[in-house]
Amino acid sequence: MRTSIAPVQALVENALPDAVSGGVASVIGQRPSTYSKSPAMWNAAMRELGLEGAYLPFDVPASGLRALLAVLRDTPAWWGGSVTVPHKKAVWDLLDDVDASAYAAGAVNTIVRTDTGRLVGANTDGAGLVFALLDGGDEPPLIDTLHGALVLAIGGGGAARAAVAALAPLLGTGEVLINTRTPARARNLAERVASLGGRGRAVQDRDLDALLPAVDVVINASTVGQAGIWKQGDGWTMLEAYSPLAPADAPVITGTSEDAIRSAWREQAAAGVEANLQCSMARVQRLQRHAVVVDMVYAPAETVLLRHARAAGHRATNGRRMLIGQAAEALVRHVCARALAQIGSDHADVRGTVRRAMAAAYKE
């Protein structure tokens, strides 16, 4: 069976194939076609499982999200897929329902299309983070237990909400410190942790120097450090040069030429980047040697934060482990669940297979 992609192509900014064999899954974001590892990972896993279909990137601006979902709702061949920045919160109100995992996180990173055309949101980011910290698959876990740990979570978006929701019931006597650019958002996340039975506290940048010596786990759940050019307001900015562990006041550049934007950005950002790097390195050195660092960013493979952490002797990982963990959960439990049932595959049996296939397909 060949599935036409033409109705979707009119609503996304990247080029798609005219048609695919079997079903369709996708990653929906601002520009996933330029950086996302997910298509290679999902397509490798689907081949390994014998599922006929394709996983494609859909580049869609916020203004086009509603129209795209309307078309996908009327496309029976679309199984569902992933939602990435900056749409994890915006997509919520455009869905027909969300499950308990999405409610706990307050954001959606996975959508399933039901047989009747209903779009149901879920969230697997938290499961991916726990996998990255405590399991790791074929790699050693980063930490033996989260019980009693002091965790610093940086960021206030959908990934951060999923992270603190997943950590809350695992900390026991521990606590999660939440640092965001907006103090009110940090307080809201701390209250969310408390509602889930954990201990959470909003902290500001000026608090970090005093707190870092007691921190056991640092998690960057923000986009600071991410590669690429990002739309912001009426202009564009870049975040790759910064560490999230220090203030990052990235300039916003207007223009239509990418080369001109990059050139102007570098000139205007130079002083701020240098200050950020100096502050970040000093803060990493305040951590105790046993502390581990997780950067959810995976493009580039080594962010500024990870480079500083490793230089100071800390165990650290980028978003690779988490991406594999959350993607395997999304494929097996949500997006491809019906297709797997049709070929007689059991969830517990295939999860390991999916993780291994995705890990092999992941390219730094």
Image: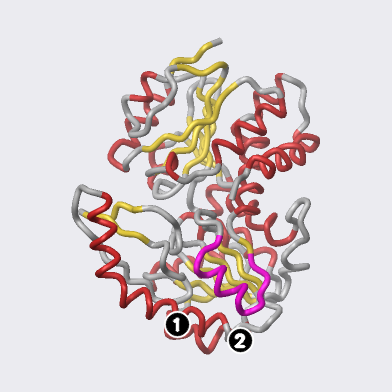
**C-alpha gap between disc 2 and disc 1:** 15 Å
**Mark 2 Cα-neighbour bin, 10 Å: few <14, some 14–19, many ≥20:** some
Q: Image check: 173 left or right of 140? A: left
Q: Quadrant of residue 214?
A: bottom right
Q: Earlier in the sequence, mark 2 or mark 1?
A: 2
Along the viewing direction, whichever of 180 and 234 lies nearer the viewer: 234
Measuring 70% from the left and 38% from the top, which residue is drawn there?
A: 357
Task: Read off the magenta span.
Answer: 302-316
Q: Is residue 228 left or right of residue 161?
A: left
Is residue 244 covered in magenta? no
Q: Amino acid at mark 1?
A: Cys
Tell me the quadrant of the picture where the N terminus can be found: top right
Where disc 2 sits, the SS reads helix
Q: Residue lying at the far right in this picture: please name it.
A: 349
Residue on which the image places disc 1: 279
Type of the residue with mark 2: Pro
- x, y percent for residue 358: 66, 41
Q: Residues within 10 Å of mark 1 (few under 14, many from 20)?
A: some
Q: Is residue 93 visible?
A: yes
Q: Tell me residue 69's x, y (percent).
A: 39, 31
Place of residue 192 in the rendered image (x, y in percent of width and height, measured from the top left): 52, 64
Structure colour scheme: secondary structure
Question: Is residue 199 in sight in this rendering?
Answer: no
Tell us which disc is closer to us: 2 or 1.
1
Quarter holding residue 348: top right
Residue 343 drawn above or below residue 223: above
Query: Mark 2 sits on what residue?
Result: 213
Q: Position of residue 85 (x, y in %)?
A: 43, 49
Tag count in the figure? 2
